[in-house]
Each structure stands twice: as structure tokens, then as C-alpha cells.
Image (cartoon, coloured by chain):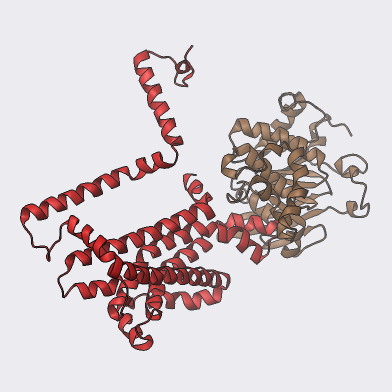
Chain colours: A brown, B red
Amino acid sequence: MSLTGPDEQRVRRPARPATTGPSALAPSGAADSEAPQISVRGVSKRFGAVVALRGVDVSIDRHEKVAILGPSGCGKSTLLQIVAGLLDADVGTVSVAGATAAKDRLACCALMPQRDLLLPWRSALDNASIALENRGVKRRDARERTRPLFQRFGLAKFEQLRPPQLSGGMRQRVSFVRTLMAEKDILLLDEPFGALDSITRAEMQEWLRGAMRDVPKTVLLVTHDVEEALLLADRVVVLCAHPGRVVRELDSRLEEVGSRREIVTSPEFVKLRELALEALE
Amino acid sequence: MSATDLHPLGAAPDSGQDDAEQLAFDNFQAGRRKSGPRRLASNYGAAAGLFALSIVAWQVFVTVGGLPEYLLPVPSEVASSLVDDWGNILGPATLATLREVLLGFLIATTLGIGIACVLHLFGPLRRAVYPLLIASQTIPVIVLAPILVVLFGFGILPKLIIVTLICFFPIVVNGLDGLSSVDDDYIRMMRTLDAGRWAIFRRVEFPAALPLIFSGMRVAATFASIGAVFGEWAGSNAGLGYVMLEAEPNLLTARMFSAIIILTVISTLLFGIVSLSQRLIAPWSRQEKAR
């Protein structure tokens, strides 16, 4: 399958490739990887008179990275919260790693919120290791286990600082490490850089792109930023608003390698961005 | 090239003005970094000056106006009463009142925080108890004082009860507000990170409520000595309230003023202790306000 093929091949991938793509990188659980790890079927949700989602279908393979792209108010955060088990759908079924009950879904996902939500009374390191402490790990052990990730993600110098002493980008990194330390196979990212200025956001997108390559996890990312979706995900699901529904899916695995600037200006990327923007209209 | 060339607002049209600006900026920076005594002076200097001025005005007003001492004593007389009566009368009375204030405040704080936590953790209990708690505050605690004296005698117990009753309410109300005002996003975040009810309470809600709990405690600190004095007025044989009761019929107005001054000092001290412990226990509460 050619990645630079005609548009039709980009849009609505007909069948999932059996041997290529990130899912093939997961050697374990051959039987599991057959069935999608996250499966959303005909999900609708309304809040009072507002229909947030109508008949949404999304399915995500193990260790696949998918972005949900849509304008504000299209219900994409609601969809993420439904997957995470923080909300229940009115209609439709949601299955996450085989779990269908909200409580069980909650146990297999880690959600990175839009705001960093770091606790000002904890150091950066203690903030990141809070999930371990919640599971009963002693604080000292929790710190030891989190430290390697701090080093890997360029946070070693900031371990002891409190959130107000960190820049917005740094706080978002700590928040990402905190989500990783939940040690879940599925990461849900809710507009992770929505609160950052555009320069820092570009920097963080490049950083997260590298970070996600290193961690074999299933990622479901929600964003209203076209470039962010295309850069970070293998597949982009475009949602439109009022009511939220899927209008298109794009294969966004990029051939181009290099810096963010090189990728963003490559013809392949420009073409994809046009397709995404067209779908959003 | 001077530092002013790097000013983000660009060119330097008038060097004189710029130097002045730079100087002001430096002073501002120095002011921000001022430590200990200098910061104290800049924070409380004006208040101390005004206080001193009003003392002088008081002294002059009484002396020139020729008011008799039993109506309004001059500050110097109050000061000499403070010194002369300290040994036999004011000293022991201060100790007695201080014990009532501190013990009562401690009990109120423990009880207040405890009740706030229990009510917060058990919703049905909160709905049952909270309205009654508020209703109970419409009973003037002052009128309870004589009843408590009848019940428990002239000892320290009725005073402790009154101080506790007056002090614990602002702590409970502030504590409950603080515990329940945590942003839902934090709770959701914790739930996705394997936190149970207790973990959320311990790691998020309680620390988040601490700044409000401390402001409740500060309010309570100013009430505590009022409670103690009311308790003593209702029936006692020791304490500053008792000293005031005794001094009044004897027209020892200077001694009454001395007692009032000591009470003020006790309240201020308690207030200071609470503020200091907040700085030590919950240093983030000031930073959070800045955001």
C-alpha cells in the first residue's frame, strides 16, 4: 500500500493492513490484536436538549495512535470521557480492552487532561508519581520508579520544583509523565496542548511525537488543531459538530521524517492538511 | 551599550528619564527581594505609625480636655497600671485567660476540622447535620454562658465550652466550603489515576481545603478571647474578664484598659500563630492566589 497514493486511499482506509502499521509492532497478544482494543459502536450522548454525539463509530487497534479532530463543541472531549469510563453513552456500546462497564473502562485507561491539573503542594516528581501512590506504593518507591522517566523526558533538573515554578510546557510534560505512570496500555489525551501558546505548542508536539514513538501504547488523542492531529497520529478521525458525528477518516502515517518544520512543509503533509480542512468545512 | 537599550519598549529618547526609570525598577526589584525586618517595616510601618499617632492624640486630648481619670485614663496611666498590677493581678489573670483561649481554640480547631471532614465524606450526614449546625448558630452563645455556669460551676470547663462553640463554626463552614470547592477536573483526573475516595480526599481535597480552613481559623482566633471573657463575666474567680468585673465598681478604669490591651495582644498573638502555621503547613496557598 502506497502512502503517497491517490486521495481515495488516504480517505477511509478500506481494510486494516495485516502486517504493516504500528499494530504489527506489538508482538504480544496475537489473538488480542485481532480485535480492536477500543471499539466505539453507534454511540450517542445528549446533555439536556443538546445532542453532543450521534451514532459515532470508532475502532482502534492495539498500539495504534488515533486522533479525533473536530471544532470546539463537536463532542470530542465527551467521546474521550465516555471511552475513559467517566461518562456513559446514552445509546451504543463502548468496549475498551474487552471491558464494557464504565468502572472497568476507567481501570484500563489513563487520561491526560487539557489543563495540566498539577497539585501545587507536590513537587513535579511527586505529582508524576501520584498514580503509583494511589495504588498503595510507598512515596519513596514511587519516586524511584518515576525518576527514570523524568530523565528520559528531559525533566531531571525539575524534579524538586513545584508546579508554579515550571513553565507551561514543562507542566504539560510532567502531566504526560504522570499519565504514563498510571502504567495503562491506553493513553487518552484531551487536547494536551490546548492551553499553550502556539510556539510552545509546536515545540511540545515535536516532543510528544518523539515520546510516543518510544512508548508502545494505544493512544487516542483529541484536538482541534489539524497539524497536531496529523503529526501525532497514524489515523485521523474527523468529527463535525451539532451533533458530533464522524465525517471522514484519514490515514496520516507520514513517510516524511525530520523536524516538525520539514514535515509540516512537505507536499505529503500539505495534501493531508487540505483533506482534513475540507472535511471540517 | 547600557541595560536600557535592551528595554523591550525600544529606543531611549531621554537618557535622564531612562535612568530614573531604571532606578525605580531597581528599587522595585530590591523591594521584592526585601527580607525579614525590612519587609516587616514596609508591611506594618504605616499601621505602627498611625497607632503611635493615635496614642499621642489620646494623651493630648485627655490632658488638655481635663477629663477625670475614672472616665478616661491617659495612656501613661494605663501603662503604669500595666506595670504595677502585673505581678499580683494582671499576670495571673492573663495566664488563666490565655489557658482558656488556647485550649478552647485547640479543641475548636480539632473538632471543626474533624466535623468538616466527616460531613464532607458522608453526604447524607452532611445534608442532615449542616442545616442544624447553621440553625444552632442563631442561638446567641453569650446567653448560654450563665446556663453553662449553673451546669458546670466556676471552673475552666464552661469557658472552654463557650470558646469552642464560638470558634468552631467558622472553621467548619470554611472547611466544608474548601473541601467541596475542588474543581471536578481534579477529581476526574484522580479517578483515571486509580484513586479511590480516600486517596482523592487525602491527596487533593484536604490539601486544597487547607487555605480556607486556615482563614476560618484566623476568624476563630479573633473570636476566642471574646468567648473567654464572656465565660468569665458569667461566673468566675480568675481571668481578665474577672479582673474587669472587679475593677469596674472600684472605678479602676486604667486597670480595665490594661486588661483590654492584654486581651488584644492575646488575640493578635493567636492570629499570628495561625498565619505562621499556614505559611509553614500550606505555603502554596499564597502562590495559588497569585495565579
Q: Is residue A172 visible?
A: yes
Q: Is residue A80 positioned above or below B239 on the image?
A: above
Instruction: Work out which residue is located at the far bottom of the displayed protein and give it.
Output: B151
- Corner quadrant of residue A101: bottom right
Q: Position of residue A230 (x, y in %)?
A: 73, 35
Q: Is residue B228 left or right of residue A126?
A: left
Instruction: Work out which residue is located at the far top of the displayed protein and give it.
Output: B1
Q: Position of residue A132 (x, y in %)?
A: 74, 55
Q: Nearer the viewer, residue A162 or A26?
A: A162
Q: Is residue A139 left or right of residue A218?
A: left
Q: Position of residue B113 (x, y in %)?
A: 51, 68
Residue at horizontal 84 percent and vertical 30 percent from the top: A5
Q: Position of residue A15 (x, y in %)?
A: 87, 44
Q: The C terminus of chain A is located in which quarter?
A: top right
- Corner quadrant of residue B257: bottom left
Q: Is residue B166 left or right of residue A87?
A: left
Q: Nearer the viewer, residue B216 or A232?
A: B216
Q: Is residue A273 left or right of residue B283?
A: right
Residue at horizontal 34 percent and vertical 70 percent from the top: B92
Q: Nearer the viewer, residue B80 or B225?
A: B80
Residue at horizontal 72 percent and vertical 63 percent from the top: A102
Q: Nearer the viewer, residue B38 or A205?
A: B38
Q: Is residue A1 positioned above or below B105 on the image?
A: above
Q: The N terminus of chain A is located in which quarter?
A: top right
Residue at horizontal 61 percent and vertical 41 percent from the top: A194
Q: Is residue A182 visible?
A: no
